[in-house]
Image (spheres, grey):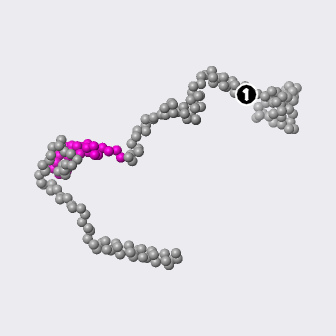
Amino acid sequence: MSEDEKKFDKEEFLSRWSRLKQRAREQPPAKSQAALPAVDPKAPPPELPPIDKLTIDSDFRGFFHPKVDENLRRAALKKLFSDPHFNVMDGLDVYIDDYSKPNPLPATMLAGLRQAQKILGWAKETKEETEAKRAEAFAENALPSSAERTVLTAVPGEPAPDEQSQDAKRNPEPHVPAERKS
């Protein structure tokens, strides 16, 4: 669409909107549903049925007259809303549960979960079994022999650790703090 077409469409839209707005102002507002007659505050209160005999089909308008006692009005409304018709749970009330009370998984279901099997196994271990597993792991990861240590820790161009220790035995150097060395 070119610039001129966009401008033309925009002008059409605005002129149409303006025209419809003018028509709406000129026409009188359509009368909505039959208006309820205004209650005269000076009129005596209407005859009201006993609250015990009220049903959902009863006329409750009389209870809203200005001269009707507030406690009587509340009692009538309480009777109206205690009807089972108003006591239907909405299916969209997803946040009405009490989530402050946790509902843990049953032990049988928890045992079926793969990640929980190790946790349950760990919880059932005794101290002796735990110590045995630690000793076994330590034995598997035992320190290498002295020959292996020499090979593993040797740095090219430097004397082997055994040679260093022999030099230290021959020429013992007194310990001097790093600050005093100069």
Confirm whether the magenta stretch covers residue 18. Answer: no
Q: Quadrant of residue 181?
A: top right
Please name the residue that numbered disc 1 is placed on.
Answer: 140
Residue at x-position 41% and y-position 45%: 94
Relative height, residue 2 to residue 124 (above, below): below
Quadrant that contains the C terminus: top right
**Residue 168 appears in view:** no
* Residue 16 picture location, percent across and down: 38, 75
Q: Nearer the viewer, residue 85 or 180?
A: 85
Q: Nearer the viewer, residue 90 or 67?
A: 90
Q: Nearer the viewer, residue 79 or 182?
A: 79
* Residue 78 picture location, percent across and down: 24, 43
- The magenta segment is 64-90
Left or right: where 87 falls relative to 133: left
Residue at x-position 19% and y-position 45%: 54
Confirm whether the magenta stretch covers residue 67. Answer: yes
Left or right: where 63 falls relative to 114: left
Relative height, residue 132 to residue 49 (above, below): above
* Category of crowding for the residue at label 1, using alpha-carbon neighbours closer than 10 angstroms: few (below 14), some (14–19), many (at least 20): few
* Residue 130 picture location, percent across and down: 63, 24
Residue at x-position 51% and y-position 76%: 3
Residue at x-position 24% and y-position 66%: 31
Q: Quadrant of residue 21?
A: bottom left
Relative height, residue 21 to residue 93 (above, below): below
Determine whether the residue tagged by mark 1 lies in a helix, strand or loop: helix
* Residue 143 picture location, percent across and down: 76, 27
Q: Amino acid at mark 1?
A: Glu
**Residue 52 appears in view:** yes
